[in-house]
Image (cartoon, coloured by chain):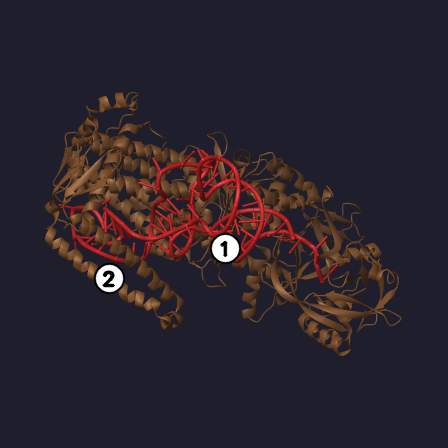
Chain colours: A brown, B red
Amino acid sequence: MTDPSPATERAPGQPAAPPPGGLPGRRYDPSALEGRWYALWRGRGYFHPPAGEGPDPYTIVIPPPNVTGVLHMGHALNTTLQDVLVRQRRMAGHRALYLPGTDHAGIATQNVVERELADEGLSRDDLGREAFVDRVWAWREKYGDEIYDQLMQLGISCDWERARFTMDPGLSRAVREVFVRLYDDGLVYRGKYIIHWCPRCGTALSDEEAEKHDTTGRLYYVRYPVHGGIHVVVATTRPETMLGDTGVAVHPDDPRFRDLVGRTAVLPLVGRALPIVADDFVDPQFGTGAVKVTPAHDPNDFWIGERHGLERVNVLNPDATMNEAAGRFAGLDRFEARRQIVAALEEEGYLEKVEDHAHAVGRCYRCGTVVEPYLSDQWFVRMKPLAEPALAAARDGTLRFTPQRWTKVYEHWLENVRDWCISRQIWWGHRIPVWTCGRGHVFAAREDPDRCPECGSAELQQETDVLDTWFSAWLWPFSTLGWPDETEDLATFYPTQTLVTGAEILFFWVARMVMAGYYCTGRCPFTDVVIHGTVRDERGRRMSKSLGNGIDPREVIAEHGADALRFTLVTAAPTGTDLQLAPDHFIAGRNFANKLWNAARFVFLNVPESFAPSPPEKARPEDAGTDGAGADRETAGDEQEAVDRWILHRLDETTRAVDASLAAFRIGDAAGAIYSFLWHDYCDWYIEWCKAGLDRPHGDRTRSVLLTGLERSLRLLHPFMPFITEEIWQALPAPLRAAESIMIEEWPGPAGWDYPEEAGRVALMQEIIGRARNLRAEYGVPPGRRAPLIVAAAEPKAREELARHAADIARLAGASETRVVPDTPRGDGTVVQVVRGGIEVAVRLADLVDVDKERERLTSEIRRTEALLGSTRHKLADREFIARAPDEVVERERRKAVDLEGALERLNDLVAALEPR
RNA sequence: GGGUGGUUAGCUCAGCCGGUUAGAGCGCCUGCCUCACAUGCAGGAGGUCGCAGGUUCGAGUCCUGCACCGCCCACCA
């Protein structure tokens, strides 16, 4: 960050960065000023709202990025959207808190440090638990705040004094508090169930952490002999698990197997006797209608086994190699075992057939390894009771989703929620606060205990597992504010208002936060959940490190500035659907910044430093009145007044549009409205109009409007492009600046500039000018050539109005003068364009171009075009060409032909127009 | 299997309560270095709104069905 002192030392009203009377350069250069402003804002405490009594708070908590992370486009989008909302509310007078922080990301971080260790030829076991955890902490100390620097570069207005980390002492205390409460309430339990096991990470995962990937696998049909020469055929996708089979199940009503129920099958390769049981779970339609039952390796089989008292035989080691129960296959990796078992089955005549089979395979969300359903002792949270208030909140509107459709997804998950496996067999994280004493008493405790509360035994053993990283994340909205203590921060800023996130963590995080919010604080932790899309590359692929298709936000900032990045991201993000981004897109944001910069330069060049702007008046009732009254009054106005009023009217319209869009979280629309106003209304029309208006009698009024328009636009734009708006705003005349920074300046509301009559009139003139420009372009009029523009209007009133603006119309249309007449002259080579409301514009071609020369030019152009079209058509008729040329070349030729046909038609029309009628 | 989003210009997308001639940005074509900006200005070309029905005076817009693409969920091994 750059030293802020140059900006702070500036005397009031004396902008230091831009030289007095103007802004430097024809191109906006963000590189130097962004860091300077950020340091200044932060130094002045704008990011740090006080707790306690005061104006309405507005709180957003950041979805804490993984401490291992570097800023990617997803973060840039997510945090920019949040920052827009926070900055806008801050300007609107709220005590806006944007609370930042990072997540310890248990498995992910442990993996990173383990990889680092591996490079040194070490494993975590070489270090031991304590040393390893120290090592992770050291890693965090070194790299953990990197993402903060990156967020600062983005201009995110987070309260860094309130930054939190999920393993902070305070948050760790909150984790323990919740765990113990849940434990005491009977909502946490321990048990031996089938969970998702990642053999690479060596830990259990929650259902959500096992990502389902559609895969084409194989379905193996295996014959299991039953005594008496008959056999039963079962189908399996994981033949290696058959070594753990302890039964065969069929549907109770299936006539094919009625006689088999109660008998035993023999497990091939192993020889174990398998009871054949009848169970409703079995689908007679699928496979052969008979299922091998492997209670230790399949959740369904586990429950079948429970119902029928089948043995559980675990054949896998935690690293997914076969264990000693696998007999001669022991020691093999699961997939190698699969190959060998299939081969053995085939050899021994047990394999009936193999079919391709599409199914979903779970993979570890951290390392991508195929997870194994695995029987083990784990800790779970009973979710049903917690889900109820969370579900009610969505149903009764306490909790709203934007876009709304996510409500259903959220509800569906909660309605079918299953218990949450929260224990992880890793070392980095919150260790489960449960102890067992020497006499077997098990208890949970908020503080590390000295002795067993039941028997006083000092021989205590703490659980070795740590908690799922989401077990701290689900407390985030209140643990960060001091909970379980009744802090002032908590009282002031909780519940929060808006949660902005991607859909991919709706279940992991959002739904669970709502559950924890109700359970711990009795309140919904936020009122609005805004779901934005995923950032994809130009081919629609998710941006990711492994694909190498990511665009690094830091590079975009370095090249184009943070404002350009923010603006492009926000405008490219449609509400709730994914956004595709090519690197070029950021040029649009950069260009807009440059456009604004130069508009400001124009204003400063045309307003003397000493100029004292007077605020534009509000419309009085008669201004906005009926046609008659308005028109009467208008006859009194000067020629620039309508345009001055028009731009103010448009500014108010824009202000309302921005407010409406932001209120509906259509943040891109809000940015688009400001863009369109600034570029197309303010720059393209108003500034051009003003170039004459400034020298007219009411030039100072126009100067005031020019300044007002710029100043209010800057405020509207500030949440989106904080740096450039501050830089320009600081160069404005002092009377326009109430606050010391635009960041804390008042958010503009509509100012009562309702001038629909003038707005309509200017729109008409824009159209007239547009038609006139079109005539010039169509007939290839050389730039310097001026000729009278004829504007015909039947209505006397309309003629009167148009006559008042004749000079501006002529100037902006590039005409020598504007002749306002009752009827359009016909014949004599006069060409006409219809505007609307009975108004037409016309020029005499002979005034503009040499008709004979033009006819000649057009004729030769027609000949050239015809020749080109001929050869293109010839090509397209050539079978050889069609067959051999690449598709896109043929397609290009096709389009070329269409274009040429259109051009030819136009040229012929033009020639016809040259002839006097 | 269930759910859900999409299909509109060459590309990326708007299009809200059904209502003028379907819009924007980028790209493309033509002409301009007009003293705020060539990161710009002006003009222009380009669309059977996925397909088929239906409702309606009127349909990108509402309804039904279909197709394709995507995402989420799911205990048929």
Whether residue A512 sits left or right of residue A872 in the image: it is: right
Q: Position of residue B77 (x, y in %)?
A: 71, 62
Q: Kindly indicate whether the residues beneath marks 2 and 1 are on one polypeptide chain.
A: yes
Amino acid tagged 1: Gly
Q: Position of residue A752 (x, y in %)?
A: 33, 27
Are the two marked residues, 2 and 1, in contact with CB atoms closer than 8 angstroms?
no
Cα separation, mark 2 vs mark 1, equals 67 Å
The numbered dot on residue A144 is 1
Name the residue at 72% across, 67% down.
A316
Q: Which picture quadrant has residue A707?
A: top left
Left or right side of A494 for A631: left
Q: Quadrant of the C terminus of chain A?
A: top left
Spot the residue most to the bottom. Answer: A347
Circle 1 packing at 10 Å, graded few (<14), some (14-19), many (20+), is many
Query: What residue type is disc 2 on?
Result: Glu
Q: Which residue matches tag 2?
A: A866
Instruction: Name the one closer to the observer, A870 or A84.
Output: A870
User: Can I make out residue A296 in this image?
Assistant: yes
Q: Is residue A719 visible?
A: no
